[in-house]
Image (tube, helix red, strand yellow):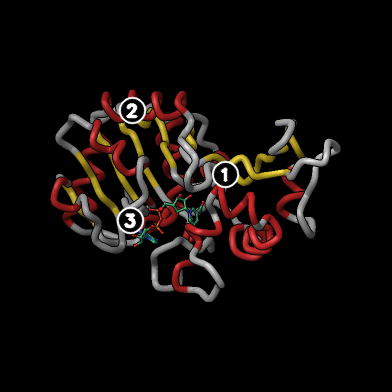
Amino acid sequence: MSSAEVEKLKKWIDESDNIVFFGGAGVSTESGIPDFRSVDGLYNQKWKYPPETILSHSFFEANPEEYYRFHREKLIVDGVQPNRAHIRLAELEQEGKLKAVITQNIDGLHQAAGSKNVLELHGSLLRAYCSKCGKTADPDVMNKGTGVPRCDCGGVIRPDIVLYEEPLDDDITRKAVHYIRNADILIIGGTSLNVYPAAGLINYYRGNKLVLINLSETPYDRYADLIIHEKIGEVFASV
Ligand code: CNA
């Protein structure tokens, strides 16, 4: 891929050693994981309730069976691999150019690609714990089993993700603000910037190289210094 915008991004990346990336579900669609808001995203697929209802604390507490049906059918996609966006971001970290990946994703693909400093604002599907006693649990019983997984203590095992109605982790949020505030370039990609408080974190950026890579428009387009409405994997393959 080559365009004036992608060339400009490449030049900025070449010249910087303080890049921060902030991403969302669109980073993983090219790996085969559906996002929420695209036409083939989870919002537009048939299910009894919208994803934000099922993925809420109160729904999980009241309907763990239904939650786990959705979890195994929709959230878990077998055999997914990092795509070129994940891989290039990991390389940029290794080259000493990228300081942190801040992600709303819960799929673990940045770490699978080799990224080390990944701030998971919404947790990870690769970790589980008991909602009653707090003991760590094997994520396989949650992701691969059937029915509602339970701990020895009888409590329901839950994913270590931030469900709607639940607060973000303070420590991770503080770190994310630190990186964003001090970044030279902030690249935002594959996110509709509709989910708060995560989306609000980008307001901490103080630089003049705010890059937005997203297929569709976002509420933040007018604040961006560079906008690329292309597939993020293809863009990162070219920079
Ligand atoms: P979203 O609201 O579904 O938005 C995704 C955005 O990405 C949309 O604006 C799309 O246009 C855009 N997009 C889709 N594919 C591409 C692509 N190849 N290149 C560039 N842009 C693309 O998702 P957000 O992340 O903004 O919403 C936050 C939620 C979704 C978070 O809480 C996530 O945990 C949750 N989510 C995560 C995953 C995952 O971990 N892979 C999957 C689905 C939902």
Determine which residue is flagged by label 3. 192
Q: Tell me residue 47's x, y (percent).
A: 55, 72
> Of discs 1 and 2, which sits in the foreground?
2
For ligand 1, give the image quadrant: bottom left
Residue 82 relative to residue 238: left or right? right
Q: Give the number of the disc on residue 177.
A: 2
Q: Amino acid at mark 3?
A: Ser
> Residue 167 versus residue 213: which sits nearer the camera?
167
Query: Are circles 3 and 1 on residues that touch, CB within 8 Å?
Result: no
Which residue is painted at 27% across and 38% down in the image? 202
Q: Tell me residue 66's x, y (percent).
A: 66, 62
Q: Secondary structure at mark 2?
A: helix
* Distance between the alpha carbons at the discs numbered 3 and 2: 19 Å
**Closer to the N terminus: mark 3 or mark 1?**
1
Q: Does the beta carbon at disc 3 come under 8 Å from ligand 1?
A: yes
Residue situated furthest bottom in the rendering:
46
Q: Quadrant of residue 96?
A: top left
Q: Secondary structure at mark 1?
A: loop
Q: Secondary structure at mark 3?
A: loop
Q: Give the number of the disc on residue 108.
A: 1
Q: Amino acid at mark 1?
A: Gly
Residue 52 to residue 168: above or below = below
